[in-house]
Image (cartoon, grey):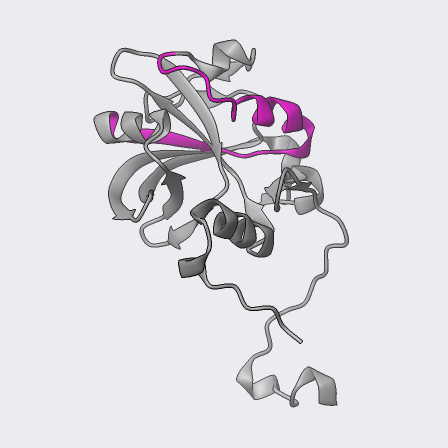
């Protein structure tokens, strides 16, 4: 038996809760920007993914018009900082709805460092940072999808094994439903099957 949910018959906030509880886990883009007047902004966005590899383009969605979106539209630059488990509370701190003009770096006492190719600061403790320039935006309903071309990536050597970022060293956080956050556990490794090696459905093997 299944239960039907019709978004047209539900309050937007209620369907939002359903979507964010079922589209899980969602990686988090901890996006740092710089306002035109030089205020450093930092906020987590859990609608985040990769759009293209050639050229390298990442995307995240801003629900509503927040400082992150305004700054990117004004300056054309941003940084996606990786969100490791050890920074759980600091990441949550930067989701606070501070008044416009307040720097989350300062309010949450988060150490920053200069970026190499863009003006927005990087989170010093983030093991990975992607420095981006704005590619384009797409407005969809109450959200705006932001596409950013990756100009430069920096990765801490402590999470690299033979030049490759290892998941058990990265320990990424993800967002789930309600106020729930996810951590990495029970990782399974399974290679994609080439057609010439196909031996039928897994259930039959």
Establish if 175 lies above or below 107. Answer: below
Q: Quadrant of the C terminus?
A: bottom right
Q: Which residue is drawn at 56% across and 87% down?
A: 196
Give the quarter of the figure containing the N terminus.
bottom right
What x and y, as percent, mark residue 153? 44, 36
Q: Does residue 93 appear left or right of residue 168 in this picture?
A: left
Residue 12, above or below 63: below
Q: Residue at x 47, y 16 (%)?
A: 104
Is 18 positioned to the left or the right of 8 in the image?
right
Front-most of residues 2 and 21: 2
Q: Nearer the viewer, residue 5 or 146?
A: 5
Dividing the picture into quadrants, the one containing residue 79 is top left
Question: Which image quarter: residue 186?
Answer: bottom right
Instruction: Provide residue 135's location: percent of width, then percent of height.
Output: 25, 42
Q: In this view, does 59 lie to the left or right of 87?
A: left
Residue 107 painted magenta = no
Q: Which of 85 and 119 is in front in this view?
A: 85
**Vertical arrangement, residue 103 with respect to residue 55, above or below:** above
Going by the picture, which residue comes out furthest to the right? 186
Magenta-colored stretch includes residue 99: yes
Q: Position of residue 108 (x, y in %)?
A: 55, 14
Q: Residue 96 location in percent, x, y?
A: 52, 22
Question: What's the magenta region?
Answer: 75-101
Q: In which quarter of the image is residue 40?
A: top left
Q: Residue at x 32, y 20 (%)?
A: 119
Count of labels in the image: 0
């Amino acid at each position: 038996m299944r239960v039907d949910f019709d978004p047209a018959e539900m309050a937007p906030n209620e369907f939002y809760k359903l979507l964010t509880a079922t589209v899980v886990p969602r990686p988090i883009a901890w996006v740092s920007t710089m306002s035109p007047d030089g205020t450093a902004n930092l906020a987590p966005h859990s609608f985040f993914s990769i759009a293209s590899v050639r050229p390298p383009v990442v995307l995240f969605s801003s629900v509503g018009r927040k400082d992150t979106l305004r700054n990117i539209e004004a300056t054309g630059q941003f940084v996606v900082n990786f969100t490791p488990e050890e920074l759980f509370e600091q990441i949550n701190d930067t989701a606070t709805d501070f008044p416009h003009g307040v720097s989350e770096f300062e309010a949450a006492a988060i150490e920053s460092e200069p970026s190499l190719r863009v003006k927005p600061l990087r989170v010093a403790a983030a093991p990975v940072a992607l420095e981006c320039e704005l590619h384009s935006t797409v407005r969809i309903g109450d959200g705006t999808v932001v596409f950013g071309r990756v100009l430069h990536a920096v990765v801490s050597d402590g999470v690299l094994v033979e030049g490759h970022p290892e998941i058990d060293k990265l320990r990424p956080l993800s967002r789930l439903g309600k106020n729930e956050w996810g951590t990495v556990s029970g990782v399974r490794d399974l290679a994609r099957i080439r057609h010439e090696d196909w031996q039928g459905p897994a259930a039959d093997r």
